[in-house]
Amino acid sequence: MTATLLAGRPAAADAGAATAPTLRVKELSKSYAGADGAAVHALEHITLDFPAGSVTSIVGASGCGKSTLLKIIAGLEQGDAGEVALGEERLAGARLNRGIVFQDHRLLPWMTVEQNVELALHRVEPAARRAIVDEKLELVGLRAFRTAYPHQLSGGMAQRVAIARALAHRPSVLLLDEPFGALDAMTRLQLQDELLRIRQSERITTILVTHDIEEALYLGDRIAVLTNRPGRLAALLDVDLPRPRGRGDPAFAAMRLSLYERFFHVEK
Amino acid sequence: MSTNQIAKLALRGEYALPARARRLLLAFLHRFGLPLALIALWQLLSGAGFISPALLPSPLYVAETVVYLLDSGDLWRHVSASGQRVIQGYLLAALLAVALGIAIGIFHSLDRFVDLLIQILKPVPPIAWIPLAILWFGIDEGAKIFIIALGAFFPILVSTVDAIRQTDKRYVELARALELPRRLFILKIMLPGALPQVMSGLRLGLALAWMCVVAAELIAASSGIGFLIMDGRAVSQADLVLAGMLALGVLGKITDDALRYLERRLIRWRSQFNGLGAA
Ligand SMILES: Nc1ncnc2c1ncn2[C@@H]1O[C@H](COP(=O)(O)OP(=O)(O)OP(=O)(O)O)[C@@H](O)[C@H]1O
Ligand SMILES: [Mg+2]
């Protein structure tokens, strides 16, 4: 079915995405030593499944443990208890099968755009790299900037390169940590649409950390709400609005308002 | 209009330079005005007899000496003697210090192993080594090259180690997320990131190399700019001393410019702050 929907893309990749396993987070807890020596409970008993190909938005107040959760899924940090598994495979340590886009774009300033993307392709034989870099830069609309250096890019462009880099090695999970947090409102809206388009073509399990409720609603199939310290899962909501979603639609607005009222104590 | 006519008109305020020429003149004065003004003042005071020529000969007199030294080939002989020593000593120091600095920066156990020795050797001024160097190498080239290498070595070593150590933690995290092998991490992240600070160390080391060559030549040499300066003092000819000092200044500036050029070629990716009001 996907093969007909996404004509012109290599069949193998689609087959891979279609059979991609569910990402499972089970009973995950994590605490840090706080400044006064007392433990800071960043995450407590988080259990959450991420079905293949779904987009899950994670929202919560600043400091509630969103980045921590993402980093543990990425394998960049370790939980104190619980586990993260991709299908049957228990995950330990960072792997290229989970692409991550950090809060800052984290491009290497001494490398051009294409070299930055190519960095993720060190496992691919050199002759095949160029085509993949081209494909990913095309995907984020930056092929014309392949030889530019990061300091010659706008913030939004840099973030798009970071997305291209995260996707380069065909991960089965894409992790985004407030990727548009530092951008102006206009650019953010534009990149949100771009992300939808990218997801449409890559069919990849996506986890998006954000503290922008509207962004979470606009992009997510589901929204996971975390409580603040300790970070627990307060709710997991299905966003059953049809796509493309209009931010002005009454249903969209109603859902946004109810989210604010339920979890963020905002009066009408 | 002849230049003379223009000058007369300009003095009477009836001739204004075209805007472009005025800009060029201003730029020239901005860059060269200060040293030129000082030289002019010095010449004026000397001419008026306020400065004893035995203590500080006039700029014109020094210029004559420089021309004479150039003519006789003496200046070139001294410059090339010092230059060769600096090049050999400096290259030796740069190669060793950068290589060792990278190794120390990467391998913690090597750092622990050599740190104490380096900490103790570093504060000893290179000049203090001169007597030993002469004992070991005689008053040949060897002693001078040793002193120069020693002087340039530590600043380059220290900034290389610092540069490697200051690798951004966020890039380390990125490298882990990309499963970058250690070799690629060092090659693609650590070293390029360290390059700007290594280059500053190399420039500092070069300045030290010039200082050390003069120190070494002041004490034991029959050629070189340090010898020229010492010889000037021995025969009470301050103009020779000044000619030697001038040569050092110019050489230091030229070699530093060369390194700066290299730096700019190597580090094109940086958008650098050049001070307020810079283009
Ligand atoms: N390396 C660390 N050492 C100690 N405490 C940490 C560390 N990283 C995070 N924390 C603590 O864990 C908690 C969660 O941090 P985290 O970065 O996951 O929050 P966040 O939800 O991503 O916040 P924000 O929205 O501001 O990015 C915070 O209280 C923070 O102080
Ligand atoms: Mg965060």
Image (tube, rainbow, N blue to C red):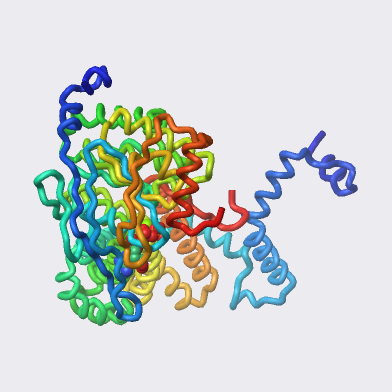
The N terminus of chain B appears in which quarter of the rendering? top right
Q: Nearer the viewer, residue B78 or A208?
A: A208
Q: Nearer the viewer, residue B124 or B219?
A: B124
The structure residue drawn at horizontal position 37% and vertical position 30%, both measured from the top left corner, is A197
Q: Quadrant of ligand 2?
A: bottom left
**Residue B238 occupies which quadrant of the picture?**
bottom right
The structure residue drawn at horizontal position 39% and vertical position 39%, both measured from the top left corner, is A219
Q: Nearer the viewer, residue A161 or B248?
A: A161
Relative image position of residue B274 (x, y in whole percent) = 53, 55
Residue A130 in sight in this render: yes
- In this image, A237 relative to B53: left or right? left
Relative vertical location of residue B222 with respect to residue B276 in this rendering, above or below:
below
Relative image position of residue B152 (x, y in whole percent) = 32, 67
The structure residue drawn at horizontal position 35% and vertical position 27%, both measured from the top left corner, is A138
Which residue occupies the extreme left position in the image? A88
**Residue A44 occupies which quadrant of the picture?**
bottom left
The structure residue drawn at horizontal position 26% and vertical position 60%, both measured from the top left corner, is B98
- In this image, A123 relative to B149: left or right? left
Residue A177 in sight in this render: no
Relative image position of residue B185 (x, y in whole percent) = 22, 51
- In this image, B79 relative to B112: left or right? right
Relative vertical location of residue A182 with respect to residue A114 in this rendering, above or below:
below
Relative vertical location of residue B209 with respect to residue B258 in this rendering, above or below:
below
Relative image position of residue B141 (x, y in whole percent) = 25, 66
Q: Nearer the viewer, residue A22 or B201?
A: A22
> Tag count in the figure?
0
- In this image, B152 relative to B246: left or right? left
